Amino acid sequence: MPIPSDQQLIDAAIAASEHAYMPYSNYRVGAALLTADGAVYGGCNIESVSFTPTVCAERTAVFKAVSEGHREFSAIAVVTRDAGSPCGVCRQMMYEFAPDLRVILADLDGKAHLVTTLRELLPHGFGPMRLDTG
Ligand code: THU
């Protein structure tokens, strides 16, 4: 299976965003997470009327992948109307598994606005090594 390009990951994130459930914010988010062995897991944001249980697209993708046995990730594409950047909670959750993750931020038309790394987004992050379990 060939490694997907950034544009293919963006397209997968756009496809995932179509399932977003966001009646309260109207802010559609899609993510596509690439595992070290080349699988792609999509995710979308899923909101709750009581607000705090809301899950972001990035964490949906991480939870789907981890729950299917994956713990190594090489890239994630995230799409929103304004190529918004992942929230702090998602940065922390992604850092758990992949501090060197490549992060591609794009808009819903498929245009990449920023390609960066999780270490750039979460400098001096707190990771599993701190607890000597990693
Ligand atoms: N959201 C994400 O899915 N990912 C982020 O990193 C930022 C925020 C979602 C959560 C909520 O459904 C909506 O965007 C507005 O905050």
Image (cartoon, grey):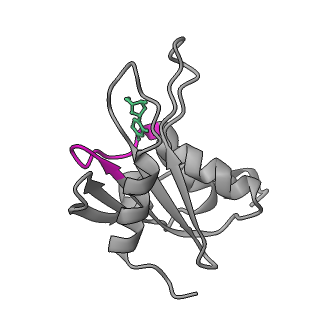
Count of numbered tags: 0
Image quarter of the N terminus: bottom right
Say which of 122 and 34 sits in front. 34
User: Which residue, as the protein is rendered here, is positioned at the far bottom?
Assistant: 2
Q: Is residue 103 visible?
A: no
Residue drawn at point x = 79 percent, y = 56 percent: 133
User: Which residue, as the protein is rendered here, is positioned at the far top?
Assistant: 50
Residue drawn at point x = 54 percent, y = 11 percent: 50
Magenta-tinted stretch: 79-88
- Residue 4, given in percent of the width and then of the height, sits at 45, 79
Query: Does 58 sit left or right of 108 as displayed?
Result: right
Tell me, yes or no, whether the highlighted magenta stretch contains residue 87: yes
Say which of 122 and 97 sits in front. 97
Say which of 27 and 124 sits in front. 27
Quadrant assignment for ligand 1: top left
Residue drawn at point x = 24 percent, y = 43 percent: 81
- Residue 98, given in percent of the width and then of the height, sits at 57, 63
- Which image quadrant is residue 78 in? bottom left
Q: Is residue 80 above or below residue 116?
A: above
- Residue 125, given in percent of the width and then of the height, sits at 50, 51
- Residue 57, given in percent of the width and then of the height, sits at 48, 43
Image quarter of the C terminus: bottom right
Tell me, yes or no, whether the highlighted magenta stretch contains residue 102: no
Query: Does 98 sit left or right of 67 as displayed?
Result: left
Q: Is residue 42 visible?
A: yes
Please identify the dominant SS of the magenta region: loop
